[in-house]
Amino acid sequence: MEEIQLISFVIPCYNSERSVSLVIQEIRDVVAQRPEYDYEVVAVNDCSPDHVLDVLIAEAQADKKVKVIDLAKNGGRHNALMAGYHVAQGEFVVCVDDDCQCPLDRFWDLLAPLERGEADVAFAKYGKKQQSGLKNLGSWFNDVGSTWLMDKPRDLHFSNFAVMRRFIRDEVIRYTNPYAYVSGLMFRASSRVVNVPMEDRARTIGTSNYTLRKSIQLLTNSFTSFSIKPLRLATSVGVICALIGFLYGLIVIIQRLVRPVYAAGYSSIMAGMLFIGGMIMIMLGIIGEYIGRIYICINSSPQYVIRKTYNVEEETPAEVH
């Protein structure tokens, strides 16, 4: 008899009291298509202001395969995922959104490269995303940034619908700093990461909680956690500005020798000073961002704090990570 394998679906929940039950039911329906698999759902309430916790508790009471983690403070999608990953026990671990936009009907296509042994991580790759222009801009900004900062192949795209093997999850949860970037952690753990083309769904319930500001925060997490390239860029810009200043000084000296009556323009001097001063402040800001995050990490700021769990057999001793 073939051994039944467990699939863990991790759902970070925020403002989704009307949609999360639909997502959980679709997971049940999809897994029922393949009797060689079983499922568990790990739903993480990211301190949502609506009644999503009540909905999740009702789901957990009706189905022991639904595990609920209630966080004491909102920490964002990626920290909520980290909380869920610590509980997930499946051979395959899936991250799914709570808004019904992830095409769960294509889940077996997403899992196929892992089943065939071709990949350790698979991300859904959407042709045209069913989201606002502002959110598309944030996604593009993050894609370009992660390509440069983490040496991600240009044709590889991260998304919110992904599946990874158990040993990748084990590597991901080893990261204990407060600024988690889950997609980057997956990519850092293995070179066998693939995309599976599919189309996402249009939002029919609620509105998106992901803003351009959150996209920029996510990009900031990626470059402070996975790369020192911004610091190298700061050094390069400093060298270029110094070289420009040196060449400009040479030009002024030569012009003074050739034309003694030549007087340097006040506006050009001020423009140069403002440019160099602005670049110095930007570079100091980048350095300050790194130092500030190092300080927070040294102070052991938690990724998340668990208030209570439901259907979770073994809670972590301190419930803090």
Image (spheres, rainbow, N blue to C red):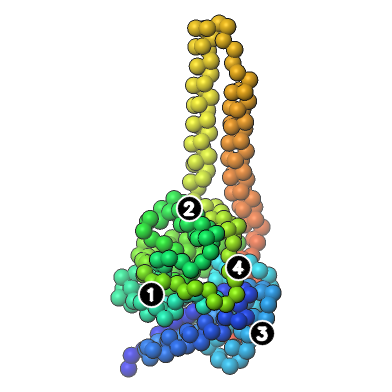
Is 237 placed above or below 194 here?
Answer: above
Secondary element at tag 3:
helix
Sequence-first tag of 4 and 1: 1
Residue 73 in picture, x, y percent from top left: 68, 70
Q: Earlier in the sequence, mark 2 or mark 1?
A: 1
70 up-or-down from 191: above or below: below
Q: Where on the picture, by quarter, is residue 56?
A: bottom right
Residue nearest the observer in this picture, 87 or 156: 156
From this view, report whether residue 192 is shown above or below residue 205: above
Of mark 3 and mark 2, the one earlier in the sequence is: 3
Q: Count residues near mark 2 (Cα–Cα under 10 Å), then give few for <14, some for 14-19, many for 20+.
A: some
Q: What residue type is labelled 4?
A: Asn
| Residue 320 percent location from the top left of the image | 64, 70
Q: Find numbered disc 2 in the image and state the secondary structure of the residue it sits on.
A: helix
Q: Between label 3 and label 4, give the one nearer the viewer.
A: 4
Number of on-image labels: 4
Q: For the residues marked 2 and 1, what is the alpha-carbon distance in whole angstroms? A: 25 Å
Horizontal arrangement in the rendering, residue 157 relative to residue 260 (left or right):
left
Q: Where is residue 144 in the image (x, y as percent from the top left)?
A: 45, 53
The percent coordinates of residue 195 (x first, y second) are: 37, 67
Q: Residue type at mark 2?
A: Gly
> Which of the marked residues, 3 or 4, is nearer the chain's N terminus?
3
Q: What residue type is labelled 3?
A: Asp
Q: Which mark is residue 54?
A: 3
Residue placed under numbered mark 4 in the picture: 209
Where, quadrant-wise, is the C terminus in this rendering? bottom right
Counting residues from the start of the chain, the first of labels 3 and 1 encountered is: 3
Q: Which mark is residue 145?
A: 2
Lower sequence index among marks 4 and 2: 2
Say which residue appears at 61% left-offset and 48% top-offset.
289
